[in-house]
Image (spheres, rainbow, N blue to C red):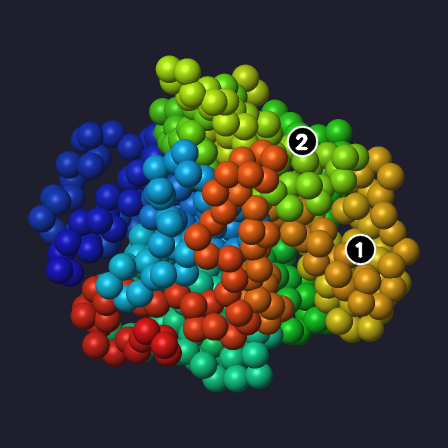
């Protein structure tokens, strides 16, 4: 088993490395792994960090998968989307909260995340003797990616600190910091898991470059992620402090549509270029396949949510689209409120767009929520309006009290619709999931999703650890209720 992991690890060091050649690869045989040969030059470490990044594009992580992953599960699990009868039935068990240990729910995400962690740990373990010019930046990137992977896993499989009073003492995840594939780590508590995530991100923020090449994290990206982690922890002032370090402005209204067709990079902090022949992944298949007149949607925008977008909110144009399926040979025309995010670049419908992971708008919305919880409503409105003035022609404003809290939450729902966050927001706010009961067609008719409500506090808010993972590691403990 250890040899197999080493083979995989060696392969990741060379994925995407344009400077490698067959002669160089032949120097280390595939039936043995010489770490001392793999981590020598600055180029070796550059290749290694690219190998860590490449794992983010795994199916089930950020690469898109019919089984669910970061691209879709937070919306599929919540109230932003309705199951489409015309689709292939993907993620229906996930959408209906009918998962159990035997299903291997989000096992692809769980496995890909720990593979990413392993690769980061391998690089970090071999960085001691490396004194290259870019060492501090590469080490920081590895720690940031290790933190991101752990954070993604614990968000699904553990409670969120603000979710309930007992959350910090409940089951978190195994926080792995050594590159040994034979270890059988136990789960930390949620509180310890989050503390370790913060430590990695704090270290990363101190050492990472202000700017890095496309496809790599930079200081603004790390601080935005750190502000989200603090928000989840209920450490409001620290969430504000981290968000205040982000200097990238919110994308202006004029750029919002173009950001999602890859014609603009405005407001993006961390994204993965999705170009042929390096990647060319059709991540948009996650939501639908086909063109505007022959669309086969897996999920559509929930009717009530679709109609809650103001007409002057540019996100309605950027995030949603009207599409149809003309059923052959003479069936009725089915019209859909389809999901435009991931649909394709300008004039395309192949789902091949860049994978956008962190955006500047989040720093302001994190700050707005944190300021509100600190009792500073003026600062909360200012941070909120920094986003709203870039989304509406006539932005709302002026709310106070619970109306301001609700406005912050609503803008967060609009801004991050179909983008990795809704399930976690409802979970950390301690709210139930209440779907609208409407059908999957554009006028609200058709067939609703099978299940409509998940009460706050239900054990299904923590997904089950796959039985196969429990079998392989006897020190893992299953989540309560499964």
**Is residue 147 positioned above or below 271 on the image?**
below
Give the crowd class for mark 2: few <14, some 14-19, many >=20 residues within 10 Å: some
Q: 340 or 228: which is nearer to us?
A: 340
Q: Is residue 401 left or right of residue 101?
A: right
Give the crowd class for mark 1: few <14, some 14-19, many >=20 residues within 10 Å: many
Q: What element carries label 2?
A: helix
Find the residue positioned furthest to the left: 31
Residue 239 seen in render: yes
Find the residue positioned furthest to the top: 329
Q: Residue 317 carries which label?
A: 2
Residue located 20% across and 30% down the image: 22
- Image coordinates of residue 243 in percent, x first then y, are 70, 58
Residue located 15% across and 36% down the image: 26
- Image coordinates of residue 259 in percent, x first then y, are 62, 32
Question: Looking at the rendering, in which quadrant would you find the N terminus?
Answer: bottom left
**Is residue 377 positioned above or below 364 on the image?**
below
Question: Looking at the rendering, in which quadrant would you find the C terminus?
Answer: bottom left
In the picture of the structure, the residue carrying the numbered disc 1 is 383
- Image coordinates of residue 322 in percent, x first then y, are 59, 27
Residue located 19% across and 68% down the image: 472
């Amino acid at each position: 088993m250890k040899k197999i992991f080493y083979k995989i690890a060696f392969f990741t060091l060379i994925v995407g490395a344009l400077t490698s050649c067959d002669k160089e690869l032949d120097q280390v045989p595939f039936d043995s792994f010489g770490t001392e040969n793999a981590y020598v030059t600055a180029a070796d470490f550059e290749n290694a960090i690219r190998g860590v990044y490449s794992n983010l594009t795994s199916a089930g992580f950020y690469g898109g998968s019919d089984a669910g992953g970061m691209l879709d599960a937070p919306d599929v699990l919540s109230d932003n989307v309705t199951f489409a009868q015309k689709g292939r039935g993907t993620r229906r068990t996930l959408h209906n909260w009918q998962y159990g240990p035997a299903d291997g729910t989000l096992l692809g995400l769980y496995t890909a995340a720990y593979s990413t962690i392993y690769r980061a740990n391998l690089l970090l373990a071999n960085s001691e003797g490396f004194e290259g010019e870019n060492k501090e930046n590469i080490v920081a990137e590895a720690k940031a990616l290790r933190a991101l992977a752990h954070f993604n896993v614990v968000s699904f499989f553990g409670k969120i600190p603000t979710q309930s009073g007992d959350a910090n003492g409940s089951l978190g995840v195994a926080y792995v910091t050594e590159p040994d594939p034979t270890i059988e780590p136990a789960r930390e508590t949620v509180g310890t898991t989050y503390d370790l995530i913060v430590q990695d991100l704090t270290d990363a923020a101190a050492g990472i470059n202000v700017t890095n090449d496309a496809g790599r994290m930079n200081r603004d990206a790390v601080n935005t992620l750190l502000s989200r982690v603090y928000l989840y922890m209920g450490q409001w002032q620290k969430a504000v402090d981290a968000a205040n370090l982000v200097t990238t402005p919110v994308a202006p209204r004029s750029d919002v549509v173009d950001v999602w067709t890859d014609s603009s990079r405005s407001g993006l902090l961390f994204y993965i270029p999705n170009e042929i022949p390096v990647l060319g992944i059709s991540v948009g298949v996650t939501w639908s396949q086909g063109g505007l007149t022959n669309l086969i949607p897996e999920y559509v925008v929930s009717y009530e949510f679709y109609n809650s977008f103001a007409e002057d909110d540019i996100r309605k144009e950027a995030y949603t689209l009207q599409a149809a399926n003309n059923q052959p040979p003479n069936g009725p025309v089915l019209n859909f409120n389809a999901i435009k995010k991931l649909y394709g670049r300008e004039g395309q419908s192949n789902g091949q767009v860049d994978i956008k992971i962190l955006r500047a708008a989040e720093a302001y919305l994190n700050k707005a929520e944190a300021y509100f919880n600190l009792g500073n409503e003026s600062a909360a409105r200012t941070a909120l309006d920094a986003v709203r003035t870039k989304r509406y022609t006539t932005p709302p404003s002026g709310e106070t009290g619970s109306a301001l809290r609700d406005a912050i939450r609503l803008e967060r729902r609009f801004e991050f619709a179909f983008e990795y966050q809704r399930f976690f927001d409802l979970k950390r706010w301690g709210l139930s999931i209440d779907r609208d009961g409407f059908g999957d067609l554009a006028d609200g008719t058709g067939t609703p999703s099978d299940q409509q409500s998940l009460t706050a506090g239900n054990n299904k808010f923590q997904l089950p650890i796959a039985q196969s993972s429990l079998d392989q590691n006897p020190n893992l403990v299953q989540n309560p209720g499964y």
